[in-house]
Amino acid sequence: MTFVCRRGPRAHEPVDWCVVDSRTLRLIAMPVIAAAFLAACSSGPTPAATVGETDITDEQLAEDAKLFTFLAALNQQECGGPAPEGDTQEAVCNRFTLGNMIQGTFITDYAEANDVSVEATQVDDIIANLDEQLTADAVDAELEKLDLTRTDLEGLANEVLLFQAVQGAVAEEELGDEQLQQIYDDEILRFTTVEALHILVDTEAEAQDVYQQVTAPGATQKTFEDLAKEVSTDTQSGANGGSLGQAVASTYVPEFGEAAVALESGTISEPVQSEFGWHVIYLVDKQVTPFDEAKTQLVEGEQGTLFNAWMRDQAETQGVEVNPKYGNFDLDTLTVVAVNSTDPSASSGPADGSATDGDEGTPAP
């Protein structure tokens, strides 16, 4: 998965991880992060949320809100993004955290049912990378501010990795090899590297003349290179005998890339028109990534849409109920949204230190 760094996230959006390098981003700055602890159904006060038969308690929410506050602080931001006018930061953080915990329940259920797990060395790698980027002292200082420990951080890292593993597994399961093969065939330019020469001219007639000369009996690659130096309007490549070097075919304009991929090494295309003029292409070599090796990229490219659809299906099938004091669960965004963003009490909770008297939606004095 690829992340686009944002400055100043809106409420309900994941924390911005621009301060951390891309390796850490891939592992920690996930759009959703599973809960560190999910308990079985409980009795007593109304839970913060119920997912299927699993309750998420106020106490669990309070603990996870601290973890999200920790992550945001490392990036010098607020948990869940800045609070809108009339809302409180604690309420924003609670909604953000609770939405992620709800999604985390689906992740945990799938992992248990499909034997998906995380290696301890992977957890160690995430934390080591975080320490390297921010220094271990800085990480420890932020943990201490929120009364968190390295064990808490390890639990969070484990859940991040579990999320990634389940996301990939769900996408691959939803796609299947037949559909992946079709996507691979349709997007073969992405998986083909070509080394090509070309001669670019303005008109089709000129291109036909070039083609006749470079395919005449006895013509060689040197014939092509010499003519490129003489007549190509692409003077930069022309000075190098028409050489474009090596490049992934999809980086060229489609007409050129498709024509180059269709050639065999050592062969020449008939004139090809693009927005730049008319090309005659000599393919020096091409390398195609096999389907089995390309599957990971194919799954990654499709998994966002497929995974979100799967997540919505889980929410509809299992059912999600959120205590109104925190907000409502939005099926479209898979987040918890405020009942009334101008009324902080409608979605405030443990993060602001309040307790509940057990009545749904009614904070205790």
Image (cartoon, rainbow, N blue to C red):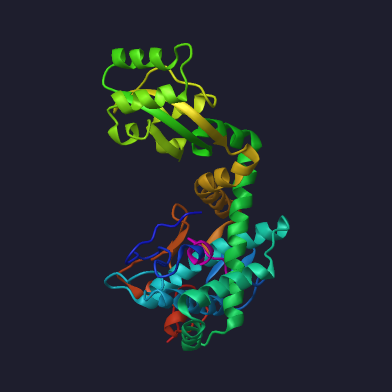
- Please check the rendered image and state whether residue 123 is part of the magenta-colored stretch, yes or no: no
The kind of secondary structure the magenta stretch mainly shows is loop
Residue 37 at x, y = what percent?
A: 62, 73
Front one among 59 and 254: 254
User: Where residue 149 appears, x then y in whole percent?
Assistant: 57, 84
Residue range (magenta): 24-37
Q: Quadrant of the C terminus?
A: bottom left
Residue 153 placement, left or right of 362:
right
Q: Is residue 266 visible?
A: yes
Residue 107 x/y as whole percent: 61, 60
Q: Position of residue 206 (x, y in %)?
A: 30, 15
In the displayed structure, would residue 24 be above or below residue 66? above
Rendered position, 298 above or below 22: above
Q: Quadrant of residue 230?
A: top left
Vertical placement of residue 74 versus 3, above or below: below
Frontmost residue, 179 versus 335: 179
Residue found 55% across the figure and 50% down from its top = 307
Q: Is residue 136 left or right of residue 82?
A: right
Residue 28 forms part of the magenta stretch: yes
Measured along the vertical axis of the image, is residue 184 above or below residue 202? below
User: How many numbered marks are there?
Assistant: 0
- Determine the residue positioned at 72% across, 57% down: 113
Residue at left 49%, top 34%? 194
Q: In front: 51, or 10? A: 10
Is residue 323 visible to the viewer in this orientation of the structure? Answer: no
Drawn side of residue 6 relative to residue 39, left or right:
left
